[in-house]
Image (cartoon, rainbow, N blue to C red):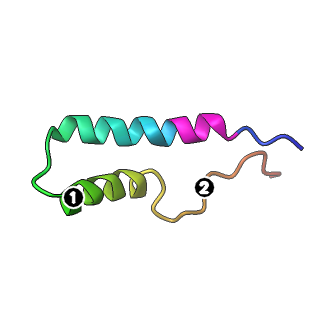
Amino acid sequence: MFIPVTNAIESVNARIRRAVKARGHFPNEQAALKCVYMAIMSLDPTGKGQARGTMR
């Protein structure tokens, strides 16, 4: 079974890069980690992911 994860990983990395680039600079490490955390949580706050190929 083949699971294509590269696109999902690259999508998350791109979203984090965009969030960090929009912010510019951070006063400390905690602020940077919070920005990354918020970018990741905005992807899917439930953590369930998308349902693919579900039968109706």
Amino acid tagged 2:
Gly
Indicate which disc residue 44 carries: none
Rendered residue at 59%/40% (across/down): 8
The amino acid on which the numbered mark 1 sits, given as a three-letter code, is: Glu
Identify the image quadrant of residue 30: bottom left
The residue stretch that appears in magenta: 5-10
Mark 1 and mark 2 lie on one chain; the one further toward the N terminus is 1
Q: Which mark is residue 29?
A: 1
Crowd tier of the residue under label 2, counting other residues whose Cα lies within 10 Å: few below 14, some 14–19, many 20 or above: few
The local secondary structure at tag 1 comes to helix
**Coordinates of residue 2 in the picture (x, y in percent):** 84, 40
Secondary structure under badge 2?
Answer: loop
Q: Which residue is mark 2?
A: 49
Query: Is residue 48 inside the magenta stretch?
Result: no
Rendered residue at 90%/44% (across/down): 1
Q: Name the side, left or right, on which 30 lies relative to 56.
A: left
| Residue positioned 29% across, 58% down in the render | 33
Callout 1: few (<14), some (14-19), or many (20+) C-alpha neighbours within 10 Å? few
Q: Position of residue 53 (x, y in %)?
A: 78, 45
In front: label 1 or label 2: 1
Magenta: main secondary structure equals helix
Q: Nearer the viewer, residue 31 or 4?
A: 31
Where residue 41 sits in the image (x, y, percent)? 41, 58
Mark 1 to mark 2 CA distance (whole Å) = 29 Å
